[in-house]
């Protein structure tokens, strides 16, 4: 069975346009609170503390990105 290329192109264009619209909407509505993210390096730091610090900062960043305060 042969597919209709114009219909396939239309759906592809609609997916691209809706993705762009969703990106614009997210950019206009959601702001990440990056003030709480800090990285401190005090001389020697082992890899466990480095990973723990990165994990803590990523959680703070995601909490700021998901917050509803404007």
Image (spheres, rainbow, N blue to C red):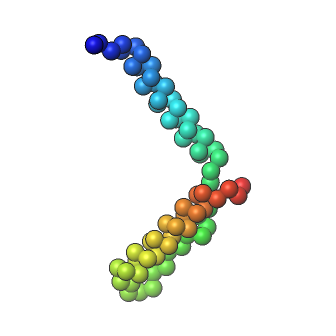
Residue at image x 43%, y 77%? 52
Residue at image x 45%, y 71%? 55
Left of 4 or right of it: where is 13? right
Residue at image x 60%, y 57%? 66
Q: Position of residue 24 (x, y in %)?
A: 58, 39
Q: Where is residue 59 in the image (x, y as percent from the top left)?
A: 52, 67
23 over 45 or under it: above or below: above
Quarter of the picture holding the C terminus: bottom right
Image quarter for residue 44?
bottom left
Q: How many marks?
A: 0
Identify which residue, 4 or 22, lies in the foreground. 4
Regarding residue 32, the answer to whether it shows in the image is no
Regarding residue 52, the answer to whether it shows in the image is yes
Q: Position of residue 15 (x, y in %)?
A: 47, 29
Identify which residue, 6 or 35, lies in the foreground. 6
Residue at image x 45%, y 81%? 41
């Amino acid at each position: 069975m042969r597919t209709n290329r114009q219909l396939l192109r239309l759906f592809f264009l609609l997916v691209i346009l809706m993705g762009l619209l969703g990106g614009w909407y997210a950019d206009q509505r959601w702001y990440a609170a990056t003030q709480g993210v800090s990285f401190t390096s005090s001389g020697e730091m082992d890899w466990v503390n480095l990973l723990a610090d990165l994990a803590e900062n990523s959680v703070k960043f995601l909490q700021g990105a998901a917050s509803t305060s404007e």
